[in-house]
Image (cartoon, grey):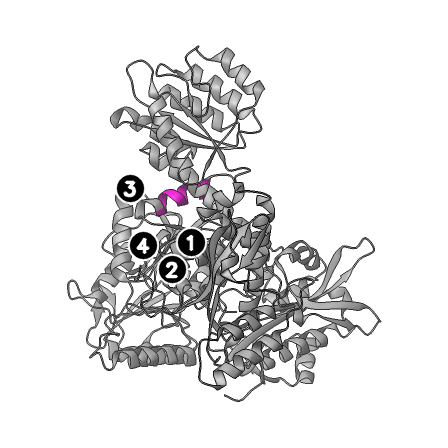
């Protein structure tokens, strides 16, 4: 759907270079040189009306003169020619283009944005997928495709790199080349006239050649499809990101304390964390974390065992782990007894486990065997300091042998230079992560911990409303509407108390504070990119001074609320403070979830300060509140970066044979039932749906189908319970809407043994109603000409049909709303 024609971009069989040149250092000359030098296995056709040949290859005056229709065009011509070139490509049947041409944003300053909009409009009208303009280009080493003006050769590998500007992409490739780091592909997005982070991540999440995806995000002016794509991809492969915050200070125009405590960098961290991506801060961390996460096994616990021949190195690693909220493993009594027997008297008898500077291969081997037999030991950081007493290569060999026998993770750091070089080669050959310093090795473990925690957040899909809780939404909205009618954006104390009371939140006088209660702040503020965010942390008069806060994106459920609390320093004191600390934390969690519900329900709320919130003795009390509002602009459903499960869209339906089914949006936990549903499809129905032969959908593909964002993407399934109470999927209809909400593309499948019971019509009409109610202008799809049942169904629902002989498909279209 949104990935249409991307195979022609990433896997072209022929290429045209528009604006190819023989002039040294001209971008058109460098692109031609890179394509030819890369050994691309297919026709490369330069286009330039002023030349007969370029680099010894016959040149053509224009796109219309090309002897065949290329899969991909690389455009290097002047800025004002780009829209016309894209139109010409569309007329010729070319559906993918890399626009290298730069300077469009600065083209006479006045006309730059207009030119970019013309490129975007031309690409949409011509159905040409455009990468760029103003990027470095595209490199796919495994296919010998170098459609870029990169100055360095890129090695093949399993990492995909996605950057924005050409300069930064070139810098990262230059940094990676001498370190032997290879890539499955390198994508420079440029000005994102068409393809953005979200679309490219969606494609790479399904690319079998890509083991991990690396992102360098310089600037996000709108979130687009980024978070939904990240959430889908992160379930199947590691996503590592450097996000450069352009603004590190809170906005100067913040009206609330919450707004004054919220920085764009912290919001970006929260968004990426919730999407399952791991954010790092330095270039070397990006590649190190990718190596650790893509090669390691999933963690079963977060406790690290440190094994070292030098106590100082072990303590450095332990300090790094413990200072970042990591944990050290506790050995069982049986393990301690076995270690006592195997080690000299002077061993450390604790974790870090120091086995002394004279530790040889046999000692490393015996200790690793004992440790890895302990169920409490899941991951081991093995350290080695050089000395003239023991051979570092033999110790490394012991680690390699142990790693081959364990289900856990082993990370290594062999200190020193030339004396440890061979050991590092042994680790590299065995696929064991190895780092040149102890601190870096410890941070690699922490990357694994943070990734594990982010994965846990990823599977949390909060409901659209709290179970057993019925706030008086209309009462709260009436108060807000009255204030807005008077031209006010801040509610009075009485109005604020009334809105909160509608959600069973009661304000108490602050002078009733009791000894031992901890003042906290809980608030809401808008972010320019990610919409409303929720802040929690140290409150009262110390709020701005301590800056002990954490941020999360709504909606929240109890696990997500508990995670937000845990990311503050104040959490440690709350967990051990006074009477009933656990009850206090539970009460705080309920408060956070209730405030999240308030934000989800009432789009008019911009800022909210609950300060102070006094916590202790098993309860929380609200002792101060201020609330700011603004009129909504009709796009309320898109203000949330993450959408809750839309339970309101569930409905019961009856099929023609009397079967009662639940029609509802799909959920991540539907993957097993969806796999079973697929097994009931005939090869013909699979061909009708996927336009080809598909024998089985793997976990990556199933995750893409069952884990959606409920905004630009929607999928409804019909479900029944079998005799054992297990849900069975009978059919599914899904749609993806463009960012402007003008066009939705749908696809549908019904179990082959359930045809003729009216389910197809029920599903399709459900999707049409949904798109119409959300203001989508039209819904379209493609049907194979030899699928008469589907063609009859869409015509009954009101779609028009048009046969395209060249593509051998029937386009179906239904107008929903004007605009």
Q: Going 62% across and 84% down the picture, which residue do you hit? A: 799
Give the main secondary structure of the magenta stretch. Answer: helix
The residue beneath circle 3 is 179
The residue beneath circle 2 is 261
The question of residue 220 being in magenta is answered with no
Residue 153 visible, this angle: no
The residue beneath circle 4 is 39
Q: Is residue 155 left or right of residue 475?
A: left
The residue beneath circle 1 is 549
CB under 8 Å between callouts 1 and 4?
A: no
CB under 8 Å between callouts 2 and 1?
A: yes
At which x and y percent is residue 50?
Answer: 19, 76
Earlier residue among tags 2 and 4: 4
How packed mark 2 is, by other alpha carbons closer than 10 Å (few <14, some 14-19, many 20 or more), is many
Cα–Cα span, label 1 and label 4: 53 Å
SS class, disc 1: strand
Residue 118 visible, this angle: yes
Taking depth in this image into account, of 639 and 448 the one nearest to the observer is 639
């Amino acid at each position: 759907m949104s990935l249409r024609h991307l195979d022609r971009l990433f896997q072209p069989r022929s290429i045209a270079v528009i604006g190819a040149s023989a002039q040294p250092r001209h971008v058109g000359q460098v692109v031609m040189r890179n394509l030819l030098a890369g050994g691309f296995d297919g026709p490369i056709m330069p286009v330039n009306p002023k030349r007969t040949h370029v680099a010894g290859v016959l040149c053509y005056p224009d796109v219309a003169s090309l002897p065949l229709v290329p899969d991909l065009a690389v455009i290097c011509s002047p800025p004002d020619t780009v829209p016309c070139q894209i139109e010409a490509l569309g007329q010729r049947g070319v559906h993918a283009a890399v626009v290298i041409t730069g300077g469009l944003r600065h083209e006479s300053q006045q006309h730059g944005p207009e030119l970019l909009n013309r490129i975007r409009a031309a690409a949409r009208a011509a159905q040409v997928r455009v990468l760029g303009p103003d990027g470095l280009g595209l490199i796919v080493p495994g296919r010998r495709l170098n459609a870029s003006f990169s100055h360095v050769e890129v090695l093949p590998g399993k990492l995909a790199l996605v950057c924005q500007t050409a300069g930064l992409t070139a810098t990262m490739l230059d940094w990676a080349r001498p370190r032997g780091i290879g890539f499955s592909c390198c994508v420079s997005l440029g000005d994102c006239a068409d393809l953005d982070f979200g679309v490219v991540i969606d494609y790479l999440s399904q690319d079998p050649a890509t083991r991990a995806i690396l992102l360098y995000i310089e600037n996000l002016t709108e979130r687009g499809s980024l978070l939904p794509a990240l959430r889908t991809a992160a379930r199947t492969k590691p996503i590592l990101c450097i996000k450069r915050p352009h603004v590190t200070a809170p906005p100067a125009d913040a009206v609330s304390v919450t707004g004054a405590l919220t920085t764009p960098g912290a919001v970006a961290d929260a968004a990426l964390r919730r999407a399952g991506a791991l954010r790092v801060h330095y270039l070397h961390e990006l590649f190190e974390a990718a190596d650790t996460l893509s090669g390691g096994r999933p963690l079963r616990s977060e406790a690290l065992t440190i094994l070292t021949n030098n106590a100082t190195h072990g303590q450095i690693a332990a300090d790094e782990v413990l200072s970042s909220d990591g944990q050290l493993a506790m050995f069982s009594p049986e393990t301690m007894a076995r270690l006592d027997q195997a080690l000299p008297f002077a061993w450390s008898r604790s974790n870090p486990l120091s086995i002394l500077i004279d530790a040889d291969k046999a000692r490393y081997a015996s200790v690793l065997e004992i440790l890895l037999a302990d169920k409490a030991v899941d991951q081991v950081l093995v350290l080695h300091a050089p000395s003239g007493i023991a051979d570092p290569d033999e110790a490394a060999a012991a680690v390699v042998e142990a790693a081959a026998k364990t289900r856990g993770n082993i990370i290594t750091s062999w200190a020193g230079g030339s004396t440890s070089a061979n050991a590092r080669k042994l680790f590299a050959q065995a696929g064991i992560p190895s780092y040149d310093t102890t601190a870096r090795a410890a941070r690699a473990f922490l990357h694994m911990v943070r990734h594990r925690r982010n994965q846990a957040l990823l599977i949390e899909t909060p409901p659209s409303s709290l179970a057993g809780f019925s706030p008086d939404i209309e009462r709260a909205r009436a108060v807000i509407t009255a204030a807005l009618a008077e031209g006010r954006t801040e509610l009075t104390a009485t109005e604020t108390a009334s809105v909160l009371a509608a959600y069973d939140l009661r304000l108490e006088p602050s002078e009733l504070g009791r000894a031992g209660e901890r003042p906290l702040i809980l608030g809401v503020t808008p972010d320019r990119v990610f919409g409303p965010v929720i802040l929690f942390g140290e409150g009262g008069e110390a709020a701005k001074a301590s800056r002990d806060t954490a941020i999360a994106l709504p909606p929240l459920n109890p696990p997500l609320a508990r995670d937000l609390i845990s990311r503050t320093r104040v959490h440690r004191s709350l967990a051990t403070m006074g009477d009933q600390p656990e009850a206090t934390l539970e009460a705080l969690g309920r408060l956070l979830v209730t405030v999240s519900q308030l934000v989800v329900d009432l789009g008019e709320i911009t800022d909210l300060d609950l300060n102070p919130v006094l916590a202790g003795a098993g309860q929380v009390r609200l002792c101060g509140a201020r609330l700011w509002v603004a009129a909504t602009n009709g796009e309320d459903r898109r203000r949330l970066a993450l959408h809750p499960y839309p339970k309101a869209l569930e409905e019961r339906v009856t099929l023609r044979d009397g079967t009662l089914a639940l029609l509802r949006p799909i959920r991540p936990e539907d993957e097993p039932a969806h796999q079973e549903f697929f097994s009931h499809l005939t090869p013909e129905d699979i061909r009708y749906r996927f336009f080809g032969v598909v024998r089985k959908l793997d976990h990556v593909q199933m995750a893409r189908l069952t884990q959606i964002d409920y905004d630009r993407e929607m999928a409804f399934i019909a479900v029944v319970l079998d005799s054992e109470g297990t849900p069975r999927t009978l059919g599914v209809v899904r749609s993806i809407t463009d960012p402007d909400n003008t066009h939705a593309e749908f696809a549908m499948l019904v179990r082959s043994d359930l045809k003729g019971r009216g389910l197809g019509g029920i599903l399709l009409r459900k999707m049409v109603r949904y798109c119409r109610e959300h203001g989508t202008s039209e819904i379209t799809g493609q049907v194979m000409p030899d699928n008469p049942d589907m063609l009859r169904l869409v015509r009954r629902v009101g779609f028009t049909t048009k046969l395209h002989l060249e593509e051998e498909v029937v386009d179906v279209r239904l107008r929903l709303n004007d605009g």
